[in-house]
Amino acid sequence: MSTNTQFKGLWAIILGGSSGFGLATAEKLAAHGMNIAVLYRETAITERPLLKQLSKIAEENNITILPHNLNALTAEARDKFIKETPIPKHGVKLMLHSIARGNLKPLTGDNTLTTEDIQFTSYAMSNSMLDWARDVLTAGLFHADARVIGLTSEGAHKYWDGYAAVSIAKSSLESLAKYMAVEFAPFGLKTNIIQAGITETSSLKMIPGSEKLIGIGNSRNPLGRITQTADVAKVVYLLCTDDAFWINGALIHVDGGEHCR
């Protein structure tokens, strides 16, 4: 059983924590004593192994993990969570936005991207971070020195097949984070964005040509491999430490130098 109490009594809210970066972050922070509310949208079948895994993480690290299978993109679900959560006032040290829901369609040809597709994807992967942060702040749940972290990708800055809606959303997220970094700072919040390198997650595998992206990532990365979810989780952890107090409004590349080529 872990005896690390670095973040004892503090909480993380992870939006999109059933796999990938969100789940890896939950595991990393739990090892340092942080309690976690994990929000996700899964079927009953896929939720069963997840609940077992979360229960194991909580038991091994002597912390509390609260699983919430809900649609984090609705105001009703967000309001219900905030009203009913046992998280104490000023207990939230981190809110990680790791929601990966959107449309992967081309701009031309068959089954093209619609305005509604773009609006849904942008809300899911960008604007929803603002709604959650404002409501958590209004409820008095954020710690006096809290962190808000979003996740972007290189696809926000260059062409990937079928990625237009997500690219728009990620570009919007990066701009939103800059404004949140300024306007939420008086409340003690530090808002940053992590740009992970190519990572073999379930979300990546949904992108057309993902195998090609993985191959390019392996050959392009100066350190000889693609990014792993644990690499990103470790940086989320670092940003939660007291020593990261002065990092605000940054876009941090966590890719082993992949973006340099």
Image (cartoon, grey):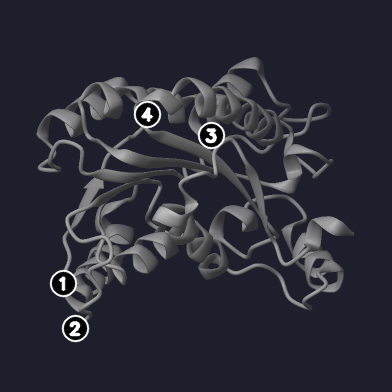
Residue under label 4, please give it.
Answer: 133
Mark with earlier residue (4, 1): 1
Secondary structure of the residue carrying tag 1 is loop
Secondary structure of the residue carrying tag 4 is helix
Instruction: Evaluate if marks 1 and 3 touch, with contact meaning CB atoms under 8 Å apart.
Output: no
Instruction: Evaluate if marks 4 and 2 touch, with contact meaning CB atoms under 8 Å apart.
Output: no
The quadrant in which the C terminus is found is: bottom right
Residue under label 1, please give it.
Answer: 62
Q: Nearer the viewer, residue 18 or 226?
A: 226
Residue under label 3, please give it.
Answer: 125
Instruction: Evaluate if marks 1 and 2 touch, with contact meaning CB atoms under 8 Å apart.
Output: yes
- Label 2 crowd bin: few (<14), some (14–19), many (20+), radius 10 Å: few
What is the CA distance from the residue labelled 1 to the residue labelled 3? Answer: 32 Å
Mark with earlier residue (3, 4): 3
Residue under label 2, please give it.
Answer: 1
Secondary structure of the residue carrying tag 3 is helix
